[in-house]
Image (spheres, grey):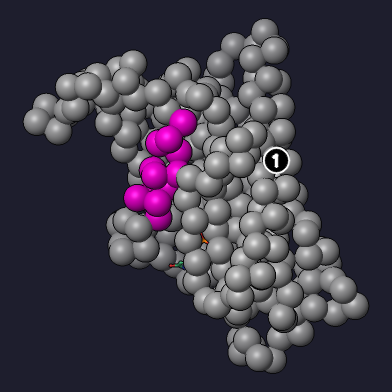
Amino acid sequence: MKKGEDIEFIKEGKRVDGRGFDELRDIKIEVGVLKRADGSCYLELGNNKVIAAVYGPREMHPRHAQDAKMAVVKFRYNMAPFSVDDRKRPGPDRRSVEISKVSREAVEPVIIKEYYPKTAIEVYVEILQSDAGTRTAGINAASVALADAGIPMKDLVSSVAVGKVGGEVVLDLNAVEDNYGEADMPIAMIARRNVITALQMDGRMTKEEIEKGLKLAMNACHQIYELQRTALLKRYDSSEDRAA
Ligand code: UDP
């Protein structure tokens, strides 16, 4: 495998996969793909393939973990062993525990938890194939699956990463850019209100670069929001039954 410094990240204004600096990978969203879950979503972001399933609101167990005033939101992000180049050891690890927490915090602000005291709303995100940006893909899918489950929400949450590769601020890093680039900054936001609900950062960027990245992310989240909305409308405008 090449080392980061050997990679020509930018060539004639294009990135390693031919995209422009402000270009998203292709996104595909399908709603209601699982029969057993209350809500579900399958989402592709370039070569990432993720599925989100939502259960609830349902009675919270163990009972001592209930909140008498509102629902408790649980979020589990999991990478399938076959989702990465080298088989991943099954089960939770530090990374998945961290991403689960961050993803929960990203979607929680739009959920009207007060409507369902003492209940649990459970979100499961399974990464089937990864190519960097899996947490952002998972948050986008989870947001749609929550809506599909009929969970009362103030809005949808949309998510994308920005970062720095080859000295340029770029949108939606792929695996080569993420692993060998200079910085990676995943962001989640309520696109229609420009409210950020999660922001992380790996690497270094100047204040100006961060501002530029935030602008790219805001534009992209508006695009993603439209795709999420269109997928939900497609699901509920048609008279088809739920997934067989
Ligand atoms: N990755 C991997 N094995 C791991 C963790 C990550 O191969 O155990 C790869 C995977 O393709 C992932 C990418 O590295 O999408 C970037 O991982 P990161 O931790 O930055 O999270 P992500 O960008 O997926 O949210």
Q: Residue at x 47, y 50 (%)?
A: 198
Residue 47 appears anywhere in the view: no
Inspect the magenta stretch and tell me whether residue 111 lies in it. no
Q: Is residue 116 left or right of residue 239?
A: left
Name the amino acid, label 1: His
Q: Residue at x 70, y 12 (%)?
A: 238
Residue 157 appears anywhere in the view: yes
Give the class, few, some or many, for how many residues have Cα within 10 Å of label 1's Cα (few <14, many ≥20): some
Q: Which residue is mark 1?
A: 222
Q: Quadrant of the C terminus?
A: top right
- Most foreground residue, 128 or 204: 204
Residue lying furthest left: 64
- Give the image location of residue 60, x and y in percent: 20, 26
- Give the image location of residue 63, x and y in percent: 11, 27
Residue 169 higher or lower than 128, as above or below: below
Q: Residue at x 32, y 34 (%)?
A: 73
- Give the image location of residue 79, x and y in percent: 43, 55
Among the 4 quarters of the image, the one containing residue 24: bottom right
Which stretch is magenta?
99-110
Residue 220 higher or lower than 233, as above or below: below
Q: Is residue 209 left or right of residue 111?
A: right
